[in-house]
């Protein structure tokens, strides 16, 4: 028995809808929260740098950052960057993730700051950019100075990120108090870090609740109105949250001092790390003066 054939028509595939600002914002907030959790997990690993005394690490990285900031030769900066990468390997961190975290933002932001200087430093001309009213001329000295600036920023930021990834935030704050940093400054740093984390969770919940209630595509006007209203709601929540947190801290005996359960004790390996970092910083400064 032959059944009548029916024409089967397939509807044309609709173009893939672009993700809206809600999805992008949720993704960005989630990645920020994951990065914060990832940093805390790295700081708890049993590796060479993680086991060192936080006070020694703060001093060591401070000397290295100062040496990088004073360096003007790319060879010295490259050597300091190699020392930083060696620390990343010693801390059992993912090298690819570390490099992405540093180099995805540094060339853009530092490049914007230093870009005009390549056209205003005299020297051998490299290329020209003709404009309607003038011609910009890039020089070899200007490009070299810009490259040194970007490399210097990369080295300093890499060292700061390595310190944060290998040391818990509470230990860094307690180390700052050991070096007589004002209590107000330390408390502001600690509360800012915690409030950013709490506000990220709050904003993430707000965006998720909005996404779960959206049935059709919203217009740009509706999205802007929701963003403005969400900003006001978030501000009121943050003020209320700050008061509630402060009252809870007072109820639990808060006296203005940063306290942790960690008991610091400098071991011989910590002294070796500190002396090696100071010697490396001194060698970098002397080598930069000799090569200049």
Image (tube, grey):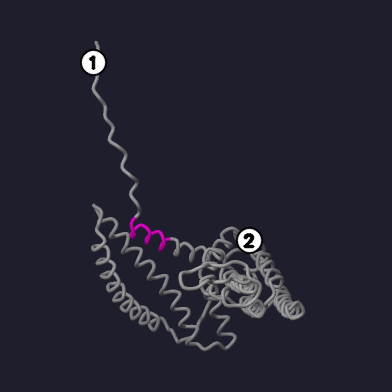
| Side of 81 where 225 appears, left or right | left
Q: Nearer the viewer, residue 94 or 253?
A: 94
Query: Residue at point 66% right, 72% down?
Result: 124
**Local secondary structure at mark 2:** loop
Q: Is 25 within the magenta? A: yes
Quarter location, residue 196:
bottom left
Query: Residue at point 59% right, 85% down?
Result: 178
Q: Which mark is residue 92?
A: 2
Q: Could you say where residue 215 lies in the image, as x and y percent from the top left?
A: 24, 52
Please tell me whether mark 1 or mark 2 is closer to you in this view. 1
Magenta-drawn stretch, dominant element (helix, strand or loop): helix
| C-alpha gap between disc 1 and disc 2 | 68 Å
User: Sequence-wise, which precedes: disc 1 or disc 2?
Assistant: 1
- How packed mark 1 is, by other alpha carbons closer than 10 Å (few <14, some 14-19, many 20 or more), is few
Asked if residue 91 can be seen in this view, the reply is: yes
- How packed mark 2 is, by other alpha carbons closer than 10 Å (few <14, some 14-19, many 20 or more), is some
Q: Which mark is residue 3?
A: 1
């Amino acid at each position: 028995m032959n059944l009548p054939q029916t024409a089967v028509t397939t509807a044309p595939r609709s173009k893939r809808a672009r993700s809206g600002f809600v999805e992008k914002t949720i993704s960005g907030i989630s990645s920020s929260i994951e990065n914060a959790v990832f940093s805390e997990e790295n700081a708890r690993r049993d590796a060479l740098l993680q086991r060192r005394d936080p006070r020694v690490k703060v001093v060591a990285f401070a000397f290295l950052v100062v040496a990088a900031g004073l360096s003007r030769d790319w060879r010295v900066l490259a050597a300091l960057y190699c020392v930083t990468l060696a620390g990343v390997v010693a801390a059992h961190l993912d090298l690819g993730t570390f490099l992405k975290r540093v180099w995805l933002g540094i060339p853009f932001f530092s490049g914007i700051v230093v870009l005009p200087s390549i056209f205003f430093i005299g020297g051998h001309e490299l290329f020209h950019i003709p404009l309607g009213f003038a011609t910009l001329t890039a020089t070899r000295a200007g490009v070299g100075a810009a490259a040194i600036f970007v490399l210097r920023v990369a080295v300093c930021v890499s060292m700061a990120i390595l310190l944060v990834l290998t040391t818990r935030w509470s230990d860094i704050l307690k180390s700052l108090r050991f070096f007589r940093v004002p209590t107000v400054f330390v408390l502001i740093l600690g509360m800012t870090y915690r409030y950013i984390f709490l506000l990220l969770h709050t904003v993430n919940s707000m965006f998720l609740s909005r996404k779960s209630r959206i049935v059709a595509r919203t217009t740009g006007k509706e999205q802007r109105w929701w963003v403005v209203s969400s900003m006001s709601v978030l501000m009121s929540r943050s003020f209320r949250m700050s008061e509630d947190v402060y009252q809870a801290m007072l109820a639990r005996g808060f006296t203005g001092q940063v306290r942790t359960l960690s008991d610091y004790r400098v071991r011989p390996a910590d002294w070796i790390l500190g002396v090696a970092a100071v010697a490396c910083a001194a060698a970098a400064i002397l080598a930069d003066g000799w090569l200049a």
